[in-house]
Image: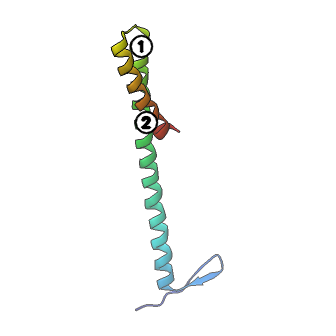
Amino acid sequence: MCNISITCRGIAMSGSKRSLAMALCCLCLLMSGNAYAEKSKKEKQCQKTRASIEKIQKKMRAGYDLKKSEKYHRQLNELYKKEFKHCM
């Protein structure tokens, strides 16, 4: 096995330490990409939830009876919980 020594900011690193440092850098890059994908998914879910809230509110402004009132309020309550989870 070849023992190559490099200097990084004044610190000498052997081949095995260099490999470990490279592996850690790769792991950090992979994790940051995963976090971005998760954020994007969360934003899409937020937009979808807010669109559903607006749709129900529009129906409520058009007028409704008691039975639909209970249904709309129940649906809005669940959507507000989802909105808090995905949008805050």
Residue at 41 percent of width and 48 percent of height = 37
Residue 60's tag is 1
Residue extending furthest toward the right: 10
Amino acid type of the residue tagged 1 in the rendering = Met
Q: Is residue 57 above or below residue 19?
A: above
Q: Nearer the viewer, residue 34 or 5?
A: 34
Q: Which residue is depicted at the point 43% across and 17% down?
A: 57
Q: Quadrant of residue 8?
A: bottom right
Rendered image: mark on residue 52:
none
- Image position, residue 11 (x, y; %): 63, 81
Mark earlier in primary sequence (2, 1): 1
Q: How crowded is mark 1: few (under 14 residues within 10 Å), some or many (20 or more)?
A: some
Q: Residue 82 carries which label?
A: 2
* Residue 84 image point, x, y percent: 49, 37
Badge 2 amino acid: Lys
Instruction: Establish if 29 lies above or below 87.
Output: below
Q: Where in the figure is residue 54, as x and y percent of width and height?
A: 43, 21
Labels 2 and 1 touching (C-beta < 8 A)? no
Quadrant the N terminus occupies: bottom left
Residue drawn 45% across the image and 38% down it: 43
Q: Quadrant of residue 59?
A: top left
Looking at the image, how many numbered discs can be counted on the residues? 2
Residue ID at (45%, 72%): 23
Indicate whether 3 appears above or below 82.
below
Percent position (x, y) of residue 53?
Answer: 42, 24
- C-alpha distance separating marks 2 and 1: 20 Å
Q: What element carries label 2?
A: helix
Note whether 49 is above or below 42 in the view shown. above
Residue 63: which quarter of the image? top left
